[in-house]
Amino acid sequence: MQTVKEESYQAIFRKYYPRMFYYAKRIVGEDAADDVVQEAFLELWNRMDALETDVPQIESYLYKTIYSRGLNYLKRYKKVNTAAIEDINEMRMSCYFSSLGDGEQDMENMELRRKINQAIGELPDKCREIFVLSYLKDMKNSEIALMMNVSVRTVEAHIYKALKSLRARLGIFFVFFVPFL
């Protein structure tokens, strides 16, 4: 006889496995996707008592777990595909908004972008310029240092200052949306 926990877990597994496998496949490729998804579901099983059975929370938990485990796999095997990671970040953002209606989603997305852009705009000039080059233009710190005729350490200090300022201004939004800039 199955417990309520086992029945809930099986229902969650049946509902989310195909979607999570597709998501993991986009991150790590088909060969490793099954392992990454299995690890995520194993971790979910171990935390079932702590998690609410709230569907958005479980779905969000699975996406976050697969994302982080997928990136760990890529780091371990040095197979980073930046285009795939950008696609994944866009998917993460769309998953966050999936519970909203289309009109609401657009409004929420525009408001969030406005807040992020406003916070970036309030950074000191040099700090903002370095942050934009690093996060939005995807330049390496050494490239920025060479371009701006400053040391790499100065670039790192400005990025640190920018992130600290954005974290303070954006609060919880910072955690979820800096990867999507």
Image: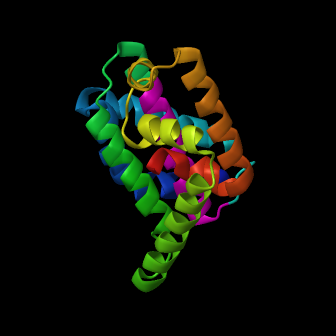
Quarter location, residue 91 = bottom left
Identify the residue at horizontal 35%, vertical 53% (top origin): 19
| Residue 30 against residue 113 in the figure, above or below | above
Looking at the image, the residue that sits furthest to the front is: 149
Range drawn in magenta:
53-72
Residue 68 visible in the picture: yes
With 81 as the anchor, is 61 left or right in this view? right
Please name the predominant secondary structure of the magenta segment in the image: helix
Residue 9 visible in the picture: no
With 116 as the anchor, is 79 left or right in this view? left
Identify the residue at horizontal 75%, vertical 48% (top origin): 50
Q: How is the image coloured?
A: rainbow
Identify the residue at horizontal 56%, vertical 38% (top origin): 126
Q: Residue 114, position in %: x, y?
A: 53, 68
Q: Residue 26, position in %: x, y?
A: 29, 41
Q: Is residue 10 magenta?
A: no
Q: Residue 62, position in %: x, y?
A: 52, 47
Camera-nearest residue between 95 and 178: 178
Looking at the image, the residue that sits furthest to the bottom is: 103
| Residue 35 against residue 114 in the figure, above or below | above
Q: Residue 109, position in %: x, y?
A: 48, 70
Camera-nearest residue between 161 and 69: 161
Camera-nearest residue between 169 and 38: 169
Q: Is residue 70 magenta?
A: yes
Camera-nearest residue between 19 and 85: 85
Identify the residue at horizontal 64%, vertical 65% (top origin): 54
